[in-house]
Image (cartoon, rainbow, N blue to C red):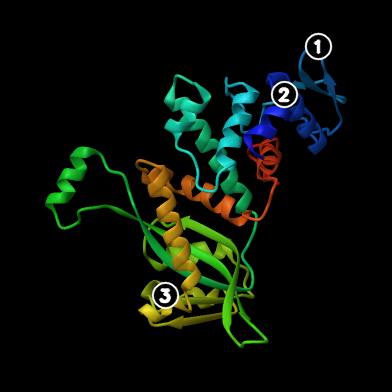
Amino acid sequence: MNTLVFAQLFPDEATCREHYKNMRIKRGLTCKKWGGTGHFWLACKGQVECKGCHFRTTLRRGTVMEHSHLSFRVWYLAILFMTATKTGISACEMQRQLGYKRYKTVWSRMHRIRTLMGRRDDLYSLTGMIEFDEGFFKEATPEKEHQRLKRGKDSQRLENVGVMVESTPLVDINTGNESKHCRYFKLKALDTQKSESINTLFQNSVTSDRVVFTDQGNNYQDIHKFVDMHITEKSSKNSTKTTLKLAHIEIGNAKRTFLGVYHKMSSDYLQNYLNEFTYKLNRRNFADLFERVIKAAVFPYWEESA
């Protein structure tokens, strides 16, 4: 959705609120007190009431917008700005576009949306043939700490990120040329470079009947326990252009995106930035990205989104 279409569909707060109400009622609600699923709308109160116990709840309660004083239209505009571009938007630019005075409020709401995107992608496991490698992303450090690091051997802290790509080999029947088709991706910040972090990632992200390609890193020795086949190749310039080509392309794309949009990123929130990048990348061919995020936003924040 672009800004012109948005302005036509959601010109004011009332239209955004009505749209959000319809989306949440269509999805269905569960009474927090009684557990019933039958509800009706109280227009005079602007709340939803359970038919069984008459417990009332607001539209925001339990969702990503709970405890937020921002209007529905501000939330809708924030989601629009985050989904309308392929790269992304910084919190400073979002603050300017919304005309909001407090930077921290805008920044925290953007991270709520990124967390929502991550939960949505976590519902899926990768299938088929998978390329896996690790990328190292620069971590923002305080000025004093940065000066200390410059005097030492390590001039920059790096955060380790596991990159997984569904990679299907293709052969042109006319020319015989080989190529690869990529479908879905996962980028996960790893706690350590040890095998335990890698094992946990594969347990949560990949089904057991898959084929995985990696280099011969020592921390990949247990991957074969979680997949049907683990194929390794010695790391070289050739392997980065053939066996692990798509994984290295996405590492480079993610780094360029972050460098061009964000001034600096803390390791505490690196996964949230990866969530946004991966969510939009996995839906690169979808035209209704804005609607998909809104649908996820109406689900209870503690439950799985759809």
SS assignment at label 3: helix
Query: Which residue is labeled 3 in the image?
Result: 240
Q: For the residue marked with disc 2, what is the amino acid? A: Arg
Q: Position of residue 253 (x, y in %)?
A: 45, 58
SS assignment at label 1: loop
- Tell me what residue is drawn at x 35 percent, y 40 percent: 263
Query: Which residue is labeled 2 in the image?
Result: 17
| In this rendering, the label closer to the viewer, 3 or 1 | 3
The answer to which of marks 2 and 3 sits earlier in the sequence is 2
The answer to which of marks 3 and 1 sits earlier in the sequence is 1
The answer to which of marks 2 and 1 sits earlier in the sequence is 2
Q: Position of residue 121 (x, y in %)?
A: 61, 53
Q: Position of residue 290 (x, y in %)?
A: 66, 40
Q: For the residue marked with disc 3, what is the amino acid? A: Thr
Q: Position of residue 151 (x, y in %)?
A: 12, 50
Residue 256 in sight: yes
User: Position of 102 compared to 76: left or right?
Assistant: left
Query: Which residue is labeled 1 in the image?
Result: 44
User: How far separated are the C-alphas under marks 2 and 1?
Assistant: 14 Å
Q: Is residue 7 above or below residue 194?
A: above
Dot 3 alpha-carbon crowd within 10 angstroms: few under 14, some 14 to 19, many 20 or more: some
Q: How many marks?
A: 3
For the residue pair 282 and 53, the one nearer the viewer reads as 282
User: How far separated are the C-alphas under marks 2 and 3?
Assistant: 49 Å
